[in-house]
Amino acid sequence: MNKQGNIDPGVWARVEGYARMLFRKDTPWTVKATLIAAIIYLISPFDLIPDWIVGFGLIDDLTVVSILIGLAIRLASENKTDSETKS
């Protein structure tokens, strides 16, 4: 967030990129499943640390979602590298 309380436009660009990756036909199912798992965890009422514990409840959400998105990016880049070497 910037000083005015608005979310940085770069964040929305990343979210848009992940959404495009999720809906592309050539995206591997493992990447799609990982992104869907991140979305489900983010909106799910069940957490590792309850959200009512101020501060820590949101940190676990951010941590788990960041790990899942990082995994999806790594899987996508590995798949891209594999497909380039096969060509």
Image (cartoon, helix red, strand yellow):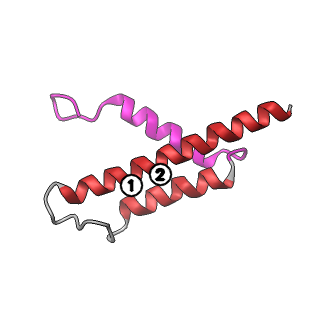
User: Which residue is at the far bottom?
Assistant: 46
The residue that disc 2 covers is 68
The residue that disc 1 covers is 64
Is the C-beta separation of discs 1 and 2 under 8 Å?
A: yes
Q: Quadrant of the C terminus?
A: top right
Q: Please indicate whether residue 47 sits to the left or right of residue 27 in the image.
A: left
Amino acid found under the numbered disc labelled 2:
Leu
Q: Nearer the viewer, residue 48 or 9?
A: 48
Answer whether residue 65 is magenta in the image. Answer: no
Residue 47 x, y percent position in the rendering = 32, 67
Residue at left offset 55%, top offset 47%: 72
Badge 2 marks a residue whose secondary structure is: helix
Q: Nearer the viewer, residue 25 or 63?
A: 63
Marks 1 and 2 sit apart, C-alpha to C-alpha, by 6 Å
Residue 71 x, y percent position in the rendering = 52, 47
Q: Decide: is 85 above or below 44.
A: above
Residue range corresponding to the magenta coloring: 1-27
Residue 33: image tag? none
